[in-house]
Image (tube, rainbow, N blue to C red):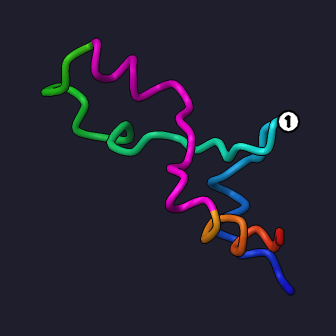
Amino acid sequence: MKTNSSAKKRFTITGSGKIKRKHAFKSHILTKKATKRKRNLTYFGTVHKADESNVKHMLAMK
């Protein structure tokens, strides 16, 4: 089973098995966004539990 190429560029697995992801809305049109909002979008988030199984299938994990 192949790994989904777009998924391997977007997600990483932590040591405890959680899936890290980056936040959206940080690429352009940043002048109207508050500094606090842009700073909080910089940090990594985790994939929601409801979506974890789909992401693991795309990463060819069982």
Q: Which residue lies furthest to the bottom in this view?
A: 1
* Quarter-of-image position of residue 31: top left
Q: In this view, does 60 lie above or below 13?
A: below
Examine the structure image and report whether residue 34 is included in the region drawn in magenta: no
Residue in the image at 61% along x and 59% along y: 52
Range of residues picked out in magenta: 36-52
Residue 60 lies, in percent from the top left, at 81, 73
Residue 56 lies, in percent from the top left, at 71, 66
Residue 42 is left or right of residue 24, and the answer is: right
Residue 7 lies, in percent from the top left, at 65, 65
* Quarter-of-image position of residue 10: bottom right
Residue 12 lies, in percent from the top left, at 73, 47
Mark 1 burial class by Cα count in 10 Å: few <14, some 14-19, many 20+? few
Examine the structure image and report whether residue 47 is included in the region drawn in magenta: yes
Residue 59 is left or right of residue 21, and the answer is: right
Q: Is residue 39 above or below residue 28?
A: above
Q: Which residue lies furthest to the top in this view?
A: 36
Q: Which amino acid, mark 1?
A: Gly
Q: In the rendered image, which residue does mark 1 sit on? A: 15
Please tell me which residue lies in front, 44 or 6. 44
Residue in the image at 28% along x and 21% along y: 37
Magenta stretch, main secondary structure, is helix
